[in-house]
Image (spheres, rainbow, N blue to C red):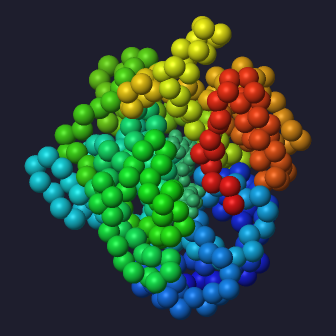
Amino acid sequence: MIKLFEDYSLKNHNSFKIDVKARYFAEADTITDLIHFVKHKPLTQLPLIILGEGSNVLFKSDYNGVIIHPIIRGIEVIHEDGKHVIVKAGAGENWDAFVEWAINRHYGGIENLSLIPGSVGACPVQNIGAYGVEVSEVIESVETIDMTDGELKLYSKPECNFGYRTSIFKNELKGDKIITSVLFRLSRSPVLKTDYGEIRKKLKKYKDFDIRTLRTVIMEIRQEKLPDPAQIGNAGSFFKNPVITDEEFKKLVRIYPEIPGHPSDTPGQWKIPAAWLIEKCGWKDRCIGEAGTWSRQPLVLVNYGNSTGKQILELAESITRDVSEKFSIQLEKEVNVI
Ligand SMILES: Cc1cc2nc3c(=O)[nH]c(=O)nc-3n(C[C@H](O)[C@H](O)[C@H](O)COP(=O)(O)OP(=O)(O)OC[C@H]3O[C@@H](n4cnc5c(N)ncnc54)[C@H](O)[C@@H]3O)c2cc1C
């Protein structure tokens, strides 16, 4: 069924808790309804966008268009062999509830992505990643509906063009496809990845550990470091970590010998922590009105109360300008500005 709301408040549909409205908000719980909606275009003169749980978006102002909110549910094992299971999950499932579902069955591959906010449908869009794992490592395919003619299309993993916090759905096909479900290949004999950040240190307090322990530890680390959107509006990392060339990195090391950098997946390139650049520009724990940077992680921009989307954006632009002037590095937003 499609539920259509007019002049709809989005305050509880974006993790920044920005108080804006959508002209129309259409909630759909089946593929048939979604196809019918896009084919018949009842509000054809207005622009359309898709919204999951709103944990990676920033609304600059009211949205004078139609927001499609897919809430297609369901998690099912559609194939299994000795080593793997193929699981299909509906776009409207909550991501972390899906991780919990997998852990309860001892299926491995997504435990390091515990506690990432958002929906299953959005996970391929920016290829969510954390603690040394990207969701693309376990995605088998992505089922979609075309926004203009309602045609169904399945994208295999190579067709998704996954990269660091990106995919075809964030670039060439941005806004063109509604993801209705995602198929994952999970392992029946999980190989735990514990080499990232503080994971090993935290695991030391356990005599034995398994996939459940790893999830617990990752949740602990995240809760210590990141603001809880239920308490303080935010959308996680606001910027991507910039990737620069070998030559640019060497130039910066001469001026700032302490600059951190990790070789990126592409040879000859380095990934620099954006948080370090932001802190060096004096932006740690600073505010413009009620928009600020988070004290324990300046890469996270927060709404301390009644900030508007424009104020958060103003803060982001000031940070981007200062980082560019000091380091000649252009920060790229990870959050989708609407
Ligand atoms: C506290 C916090 C921590 C975070 N930590 C991480 C992290 O560690 N790693 C990480 O990668 N991200 C992180 N994020 C970002 C966010 O959780 C992810 O990007 C998540 O996948 C967004 O899901 P969503 O449902 O909220 O998407 P939304 O914010 O609603 O949408 C994001 C984008 O995806 C599109 N979209 C959403 N659903 C669909 C669909 N069904 N079909 C087509 N397009 C769709 C939207 O149009 C939009 O462009 C964090 C966010 C917060 C608030």
Q: Is residue 117 left or right of residue 199?
A: right
Q: Residue 13: image x %, image y %?
A: 66, 62
Q: Quadrant of residue 72?
A: bottom left
Residue at position x 76%, y 34% in the image: 321
Q: Is residue 93 left or right of residue 294?
A: left
> Compared with residue 137, is residue 10 higher up or lower down, i.e. above or below?
below
> Please, which residue is most extreme toward the left here?
82
Residue at position x 62%, y 49% in the image: 335
Q: Quadrant of residue 90?
A: bottom left
* 39 vs 188, nearest the viewer: 39
Q: Quadrant of residue 317?
A: top right
> Compared with residue 9, is residue 112 higher up or lower down, i.e. above or below?
above
Residue at position x 45%, y 76% in the image: 146
* 136 vs 107, nearest the viewer: 136
Decide if residue 296 is in sight here: no
* 170 vs 23, nearest the viewer: 170
Q: Residue 259: image x %, image y %?
A: 59, 15
Q: Residue 288: image x %, image y %?
A: 86, 38
Q: Is residue 247 left or right of residue 290?
A: left
> Please, which residue is most extreme toward the front here?
247
Q: How many numbered circles does the render carry?
A: 0
The C terminus: image quadrant: bottom right
Q: Is residue 166 left or right of residue 58?
A: left
> Compared with residue 112, is residue 139 higher up or lower down, i.e. above or below?
below
Residue at position x 11%, y 54% in the image: 81
Q: Residue 249: image x %, image y %?
A: 54, 19
Decide if residue 65 is in sight here: yes
